[in-house]
Image (tube, rainbow, N blue to C red):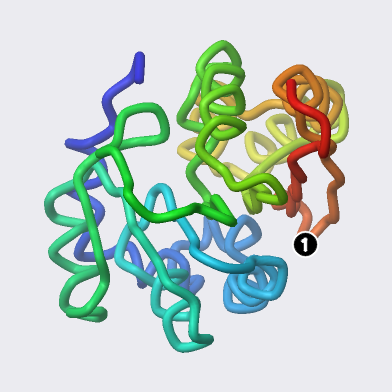
């Protein structure tokens, strides 16, 4: 990946669960209904799940408890340590959305929460292309992340954050690579997927991109 966020996540590892639990007021709306968001990803997953951006292992834990076989990918050493404390049996590797160990398992679902926005749009396209080759014939991508219906709606949320004095949030929305639903839909289609979206809170959408029957 073009941008390395490993150091940031190493620093965040010990307080990440507090943040997603709503203790950071600036990010409370982003993580609103966090447990329900994880449950949505689990509901739409199937078979063997390849999870990117495992973090402290919250989604992994839910997937494992629901009987899924899970392979986790996480670039941050400190995050991996936290995830292993929760899930000693989790098969977990160092890597990211674009670079990860070769797998012997057939992958039916590629899942992630709150992480795909770390990729530039060019990298997102490369990721979709890679996932089309990685997934089984009826495989799917199931991501929950901050996305926007339009560029205008993104700018409105940045303005709202600034007006509320949420300067860290505003900087985050401006500096990371949050994109729009039409852009993601086009990327998915170009790679051989059909994508649909569902709003989960005022920032987060669920994206389900199903691999088309015909080859790309």
Q: Residue at x 49, y 85 (%)?
A: 67
Nearest the viewer among 167 and 147 is: 147
Q: Is residue 124 above or below residue 53?
A: above
In which quadrant of the rendered view does residue 165 lie?
top right
Q: Is residue 162 above or below residue 187?
A: below
Secondary-structure class at tag 1: loop
Q: Position of residue 45 (x, y in %)?
A: 64, 66
Give the side of residue 145 with respect to residue 19, left or right. Answer: right
Q: Is residue 172 above or below residue 103?
A: above
State the residue position of label 1. Answer: 200
Q: Residue at x 84, y 37 (%)?
A: 194
Give the side of residue 101 with respect to residue 163, left or right. Answer: left
Q: Position of residue 49 (x, y in %)?
A: 49, 61
Nearest the viewer among 67 and 104 is: 104
Q: Position of residue 153 (x, y in %)?
A: 85, 31
Give the side of residue 211 with respect to residue 2, left or right. Answer: right
Q: Is residue 170 above or below residue 112?
A: above
Q: Residue at x 50, y 28 (%)?
A: 171
Q: Position of residue 183 (x, y in %)?
A: 78, 21
Nearest the viewer among 7 and 162 is: 7
How many C-alpha atoms fall within 10 Å of the one at disc 1: few (<14), some, or many (≥20)?
some
In which quadrant of the rendered view does residue 19 lie?
bottom left
């Amino acid at each position: 990946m073009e941008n390395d966020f490993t150091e940031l996540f190493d620093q965040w590892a010990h307080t990440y669960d507090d943040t997603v639990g709503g203790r950071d007021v600036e990010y409370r709306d982003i993580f609103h209904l966090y447990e329900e968001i994880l449950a949505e990803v689990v509901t739409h997953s199937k078979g063997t799940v390849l999870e990117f951006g495992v973090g402290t292992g919250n989604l992994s834990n839910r997937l494992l408890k629901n009987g899924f076989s899970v392979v986790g990918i996480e670039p941050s050493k400190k995050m991996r340590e936290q995830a292993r404390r929760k899930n000693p049996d989790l098969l977990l590797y160092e890597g990211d959305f674009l670079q990860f160990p070769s797998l012997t398992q057939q992958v039916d679902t590629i899942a992630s929460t709150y992480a795909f926005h770390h990729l530039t749009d060019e990298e997102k396209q490369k990721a979709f292309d890679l996932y089309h080759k990685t997934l089984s014939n009826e495989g799917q991508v199931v991501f929950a992340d901050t996305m926007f219906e339009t560029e205008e709606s993104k700018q409105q949320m940045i303005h709202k954050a600034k007006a509320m004095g949420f300067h860290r949030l505003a900087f985050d929305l401006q500096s990371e690579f949050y994109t729009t639903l039409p852009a993601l839909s086009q990327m998915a289609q170009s790679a051989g997927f059909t994508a649909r979206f569902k709003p989960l809170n005022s920032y987060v959408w669920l994206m389900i991109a199903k691999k088309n029957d015909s080859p790309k």
